[in-house]
Image (spheres, rainbow, N blue to C red):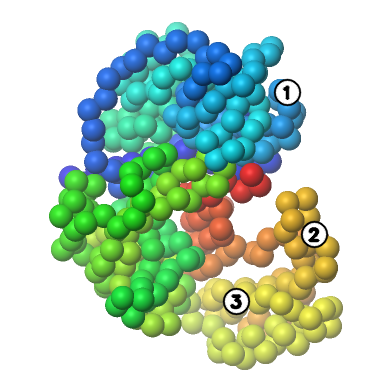
Amino acid sequence: MFLLAFLAFVACSDPSGPVAGGPEPAAVVQPEGPKTAVETVSPGPVAPGKPAYVRASSLNLRAKPVPTGEKLGTLTVNSPLDVTELTDGWAQVAVRNGKTGWVSAEFLASAPLTAEEARSNAASAATPADALSWWQRAAALDPSVEVLEGLAAAYEAAGKSDQAERVRAQLRWPARMLFVHQDSHDDSASDKPRARAIWKVGYELGRHGPISRDRWEAYGLLADEEWWLLPAEGPAIRTKVVGFGIDTFNECAGDDWLAVELEMPAGFEPVLAHRGAPPASWAEPGPKPSLSRADAEAQLRALAAKHGKPDILTLVADGDAWVASAHWETGEYGELGSPLLRGLKTRIGSGAAPEVELLDLHSYVDPLRAIRDISGDGVPDHVYAEYCESWVDDAKGETLARTAYACCGC
């Protein structure tokens, strides 16, 4: 049985996240790295001039020692920090990449949290809320089926049935589905395009660089395993693993990702990868718009030209039409230095003239990448991908799977 791993459900750019110290709900199940023996450590108090570790499943880094302080980023469990000052329950800390800010000292300790300690604290917790908090941390460290079932039960006990069902859904599907990061690349040694599927995200996963083939099985990866890549349009293709390695993904806390490199044809643009045989819907051709992509793009350019000169165009097939958007730079820049855009959204088909929705000033292009049946239930799902994260929503807007890559806004 393949090992499972867990990612805390955290979108670092989401301003509605918890105040410092608030653990995030569970969301995504993925393959796990190699098991190592761990020992439960009784942590001592944190003190200025001493190292400390995050003991929450996620912890907000803020500009000031107040819950309303500007959010600078999100730190994951066991992120190492250097404490420089303590005041009124807050700790001023330095992240190992040089960033500084304030976090709730309640969620720091002098030693890393172990999965065994988190599970033990969850089992002995006095209240459902405390138990849920510890199960969240346990899941961030040891995403076994047993722990995730405990997390689901804790959500139920805390009266959060929707969150419990989301965790259980991850145990059913898509435990064998991985997101393909947009930075798929060509390998200069082989001259063959490769897709990078995200296997795991975490802190200090190991030495950066390729992992030798003789060590793949230690991570749960089998060299001869069946793999598939799914594009936004057209059927999935069978492929094979040609690389496996570790790289940095999180500029805020120096977190790593473990990625599988999959062979693919030139010009192929996958959005998802699957270990083993995927749902039957992946073999279907997907959406078939009545207009060609070239004709739809021409219409989109003509619509956009009435309002500005488009710098970025997006077209996503949806049934017999295209969900389209155009964006153009304004010459202005946001707080984080990102160019501010204006744009429009529309739906282009062969029928009546499309209705145009003008977009307010924004910094990010619509992250929608595909609309097709991903889970195999016969209903189209929505696949989104941007620099910070990727996710799949069902037709009701419920998130089926999500993974975070980078801490945005740090």
How crowded pointer 1 is (Cα within 10 Å; few <14, some 14-19, many 20+) is rated as some
The x, y position of residue 223, in whole percent, is: 18, 61
Q: Earlier in the sequence, mark 2 or mark 3?
A: 3
Q: Are marks 2 and 3 in contact (CB under 8 Å)?
A: no
Instruction: Measure how far apart labels 2 and 3 are at the Cα level.
Output: 25 Å
Against 220, is 288 above or below? below
**Residue 315 numbered tag:** 3
The x, y position of residue 154, in whole percent, is: 42, 24
Q: Secondary structure at mark 3?
A: strand
Q: Nearer the viewer, residue 281 or 410?
A: 410
Question: Where on the picture, by quarter, is residue 278?
Answer: bottom left
The x, y position of residue 169, in whole percent, is: 39, 44
Q: Nearer the viewer, residue 87 or 50?
A: 50
Q: Earlier in the sequence, mark 1 or mark 2?
A: 1
Q: Quadrant for the C terminus, please.
A: top right
Against 283, is 218 above or below? above
Which residue is denoted by mark 2 in the rendering? 333
The x, y position of residue 51, in whole percent, is: 49, 22
Q: Amino acid at mark 3?
A: Leu
Would you say 17 lies left or right of 110 here? right
Instruction: Measure how far apart labels 1 and 2 are at the Cα level.
Output: 28 Å
